[in-house]
Amino acid sequence: MVKDPVATAASNNPLLSTLVTAVGSIDGLGDTLNGAAALTVFAPYNDAFAAIPEKDLNAMVADGKKMGDKSALYGILAHHVIGSNLKADGIDGEQTTLKGDKSTVSGDPESGMTVTDGTVTANVLCGNIPTANATVYVIDKVLTGVK
């Protein structure tokens, strides 16, 4: 994953295939993520998306294909991205997402980390994963950004 930009790196990880499908449904989003200079991505793994009823998730993906960056799916995905590359030693605290709202990260890799949007709190399953342009933290829930 280290040599590839973030969206390409995610596409090579079978645990992130649902996330990759969601990103791919929004025209140009993968290229935007790959082309960004520096990002931090909280990447929900497949089981996190499995908690969303399949019918609802499929509807969001279809809506993403039609409405692009105006879709609810885009808003949810943007809520998982921070516009700077934050390593584990600098991520603790409140962070502004690309959606323009806040998420709070607490803990550390040794004792465990969480990220919350104020409604959903996700555990970091695996973090501080470098890609060519981002640091990735794999999480166990989808952050909705809805309060």
Image: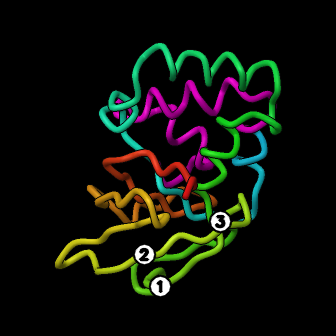
- Image coords of residue 92 (percent x, y): 43, 84
What is the three-letter code of the residue carrying label 2? Val
Given residues 147 and 73, the one toward you in this image is 147
Q: What is the magenta range?
A: 1-30
Asked if residue 24 is among those painted magenta in the image, a careful observer would answer yes
The C terminus, quarter of image: bottom right
Q: Secondary structure at mark 2?
A: strand
Task: Please name whichever residue, 125 or 68, is drawn nearer the observer in this view of the structure.
Answer: 68
Asked whether the beta carbons under mark 1 and mark 3 sit within 8 Å of each other, the answer is: no
Disc 2 residue crowd, few under 14, some 14–19, many 20+, Cα 10 Å: many
Q: CA distance from mark 2 to mark 1?
A: 5 Å
Question: Which residue is labeled 1 in the image?
Answer: 93
Give the Cα distance between marks 2 and 3: 12 Å
Hey, which residue is sitting farthest left in the picture? 111
- Find residue 109 and report its horizontal and vertical position in percent: 26, 75
Q: In whole angstroms, how far apart are the C-alphas of marks 1 and 3?
A: 13 Å
| Residue drawn where x is 54% and y is 76% of the image | 86
Residue identifier under label 2: 105
Residue under label 3, please give it: 97
How packed mark 1 is, by other alpha carbons closer than 10 Å (few <14, some 14-19, many 20 or more), is few
Which callout, 2 or 1, points at the residue further toward the start of the chain?
Answer: 1
